[in-house]
Structures are given as structure tokens and as C-alpha cells.
Amino acid sequence: MAEKVKDLIEDSGITEYSLNYYLNHRTELGTVKTAKCGPGHLEIEGDEGHMRLSGCTCGYAGEGPHGTAKILRDLGVSETDAERIMQAAIFEVLFIHECAKPIKLEES
């Protein structure tokens, strides 16, 4: 029987709380498959868990998108790409772990 995937949700809307939550719970995600952002939150999907962070956003140059950029850098995205990606209104980054780098960036 497959183990249930963990739903990890930080719903305060405060970037600092979301960053701390991510740092304290990132190992519960297992191997990260995707990171995507749309209106109001960042979602990270791993093989062992799913995390939603309401304080990490995208689409403008504020505190929320900068929190998202910090997490993307922690996940292996270059600083230049993370800064560019955080400004997209929505995005999805797919990860392949054999090379430990994102393989495809989709921005809408």
C-alpha cells in the first residue's frame, strides 16, 4: 500500500512565515518535482509531499515574489533565473534530479 502524500500548508499570507515553514518542512517533500506559482501562493510538489505557501507569490517586485525567488534558489534555480521567474504572473518549473537543475521553464 502506497504511503499517503503529506499536504503541508502555510496559510498566513506572510512571506517570513512561509519561508520559515518551508525551511522547517522541506525535507518532508521528498524529491521535488515541480514548483509553480499562480495568484496568491507558491506550490511545491514532491514525491512525498505537497506544500502550499501563501506568503510566497509572483508577478511583481514585492516581498512575496522575493520569498519565492529564495525558495527557487534553494531548489537549485540560478539567481538570475529565479529573479526573472518571480516576475511572471504565473509559472511552473519542472525539475529533473539526475542533473540537479530545472530542465524546463514555462511562463505565462
Image (spheres, grey):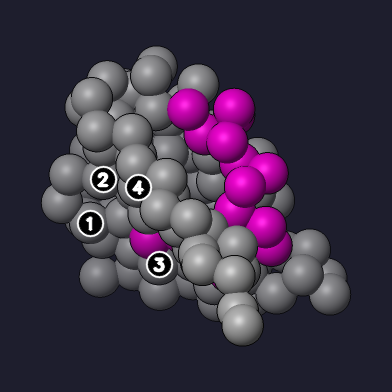
Separation of marks 2 and 4 at Cα, in angstroms: 7 Å
**Amino acid, disc 3:** Glu
For the residues bearing labels 1 and 2, Cβ distance under 8 angstroms: yes
Residue 31 % position (x, y): 69, 62
Residue under circle 3? 92
Q: Mark 4 or mark 3, which is nearer the start of the sequence? A: 4
Task: Left or right? Give the position of 38 relative to 18.
Answer: left
- Which span is picked out in magenta? 21-36
Residue under circle 4? 52
* Secondary structure at numbered mark 2: strand
Q: Nearer the viewer's eye, disc 2 or disc 4?
A: 4
Separation of marks 4 and 1 at Cα, in angstroms: 11 Å
Residue under circle 1? 38
For the residues bearing labels 3 and 2, Cβ distance under 8 angstroms: no
Classify 10 Å Cα crowding around label 3: few (below 14), some (14-19), many (20 and above): many
**Amino acid, disc 1:** Gly
Classify 10 Å Cα crowding around label 2: few (below 14), some (14-19), many (20 and above): many
